[in-house]
Amino acid sequence: MKLVETPLPGVLRIEPHVWRDDRGFFLEVFHAGKFEAQGLVVRFVQDNHSESRRGTLRGLHLQTRSPQGKLVRCVAGEIWDVAVDVRVGSPAFGRWHGERLSATNFHQLWIPAGFAHGFCVLSDSAQVEYKCTTLYDPESDLALAWNDPELAIGWPVAEPLLSARDAAAPLLTQALDRLPRYPGVSAL
């Protein structure tokens, strides 16, 4: 298992070793000791699984009071997965990173707590699973505009299928008072 730094500090691509033979394949999705040996110490408390059709865009989502770190993988199909640093005061505030995750490349994306997350489906359908470091807290749930011009995320879809909530989500600058703070930065 290899943890690869991305251009966005804190966001990692995980490339598991896949054992293949004529029966199929086997891989370790998560191994606490191997993650810790490479400097990533995490404790997961919730697993989520979704299925979406081509063109669906879910996000950008985060939790404000109880931020979630997420380990995301695509178990069927292919997605464009995006992390955005929305921690007020972060040197990387407003920067994003995207990765293709698929059932054939087996890559995963580690998205630290305090980052927004979203993905869009590139295949006919896709199933996405992700592990979370804190439980879902509906009171601290926040959606941000997927198409915020200041973020300028390079989504590979022009007119995505969105939930009503995601379609009405505010711009990053309209949610500054609700965003998590970078360590050492006080509230506005």
Image (cartoon, grey):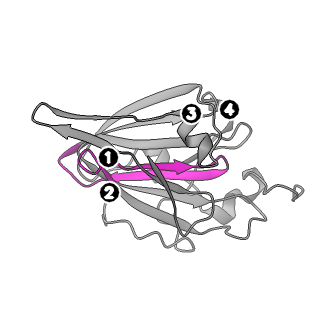
Earlier-in-chain disc, 2 versus 1: 1
Earlier-in-chain disc, 4 versus 1: 1
Report if residue 168 lies within the magenta region: no
Q: Amino acid at mark 1?
A: Phe
Name the mark on residue 106: 1
| Residue 65 position within the rendered picture, expressed as x and y whole percent measured from the top left | 74, 39
Between the C-alphas of marks 4 and 2, the distance is: 26 Å
* Residue ID at (62%, 41%): 36
Q: Amino acid at mark 3?
A: Ala
Magenta range: 101-125
Name the residue that disc number 3 marks.
Answer: 32
User: Dot 2: few (<14), some (14–19), or many (≥20) neighbours within 10 Å?
Assistant: some
Q: Are marks 4 and 3 in contact (CB under 8 Å)?
A: no
Name the residue that disc number 4 marks.
Answer: 139
Q: Could you say which quadrant of the image residue 90 lies in?
A: bottom right
* For residue 61, above or below residue 32: below
